[in-house]
Image (tube, rainbow, N blue to C red):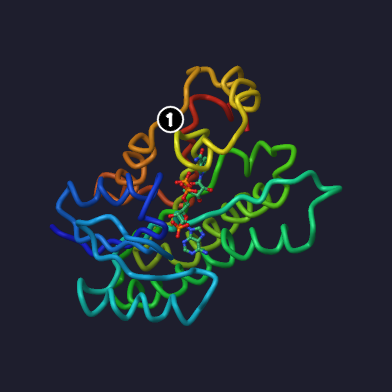
Amino acid sequence: MSRSVLVTGGNRGIGLAIARAFAEAGDKVAITYRSGEPPAGFLAVKCDITDSEQVEQAYKEIEEKQGAVEVLVANAGVTRDQLLMRMSEEDFTSVLETNLTGTFRVVKRANRAMLRARKGRIVLISSVVGLLGSAGQANYAASKAGLVGFARSLARELGSRNITVNVVAPGFVDTDMTRALTDDQQEKILQQVPLARYAQPEEIAASVRFLASDEAAYITGAVIPVDGGLGMGH
Ligand code: NDP
């Protein structure tokens, strides 16, 4: 059955791979984008998740054009890496504002229709870094760890309404975000990954699609690592 899916930040990187995975399975897929030309083949809605009004408008457009969101993938995220000593308050709050509060905004808005429908699937994209920590990424790691507490609280709140809330925690994935790292940083990372390579965005998308499938109906409050073994043991 074709469902109404929303992937935030579905215009590129991991989000685009997730959007494609749902579209290939026959779902109706909306993606958010902030600027430029969004990729074809999806309902592209302009939306900055730091702005509640834009989130509201995006949902209205999606509801009108493809129906209330039944599967939400909160993927949009940013980094602003800096050692604590040099990290400004703005570096910290702006990352939290997008990754954590932005996710709160889109989840809260999706929840309304899911409660009414008494079903829904919510998948949040965290990171291995949220659980492992990462020097120079205290803001990012805090935001990604925050998503775990957020998801698990919602799993408890919404379980009786047949709404599942899960987290996917990718390791290092081949996207613009990791291409921005220096060669030295990339080499150090790969030395710690048992599978000795980056993930392709499609490998993250496969887990997300599974969590939104009927086969995953009894999984909620889970954190699924897709990290080549990097985070083992936490
Ligand atoms: P990219 O930097 O390639 O893409 C980030 C996406 O988020 C873009 O679509 C971007 O939209 C969107 N976005 C950022 N800020 C906002 C905002 N305020 N409102 C709406 N959309 C926004 O990142 P990746 O594809 O690599 O990452 C996707 C997710 O996966 C992120 O949450 C990231 O933290 C997480 N992740 C990534 C890993 C990696 O190795 N790449 C590892 C672990 C987790 P726009 O095009 O408008 O900028």
Q: Left or right: where does residue 98 sit relative to residue 72?
A: right
Does dot 1 land on a helix, a strand or a loop?
loop
Residue 96 position, x and y percent, is 64, 61
Q: Left or right: where does residue 223 sit relative to residue 201?
A: right
Categorize mark 1 by other alpha carbons within 10 Å: few (<14), some (14-19), many (20+): some
Which residue, given by chain and number where applicable, does mark 1 sit on? 199
Looking at the image, which is closer to me, 29 or 180?
Answer: 180
Q: Quadrant of residue 192?
A: top right
| Residue depicted at 64% across the width and 58% down the height | 95
Q: Quadrant of the N terminus?
A: bottom left
Residue 67 position, x and y percent, is 22, 74
Residue 175 position, x and y percent, is 45, 39
Is the residue indicated by label 1 positioned so its CB lies within 8 Å of ligand 1? yes
Looking at the image, which is closer to me, 139 or 148?
Answer: 139
Q: Quadrant of residue 13?
A: top left
Q: How many labels does the image show?
A: 1
Check the image and name the residue furthest to the right: 85
Residue 93 position, x and y percent, is 70, 63
Q: Left or right: where does residue 21 sit relative to residue 36?
A: left
Q: In this view, does 178 lie above or below 212?
A: above
Looking at the image, which is closer to me, 191 or 73?
Answer: 191
Check the image and name the residue furthest to the front: 36
| Residue depicted at 45% across the width and 51% down the height | 166
| Residue depicted at 33% across the width and 69% down the height | 45
Q: Which amino acid does label 1 sit on?
A: Ala
Q: In which quarter of the image is the C terminus?
A: top right
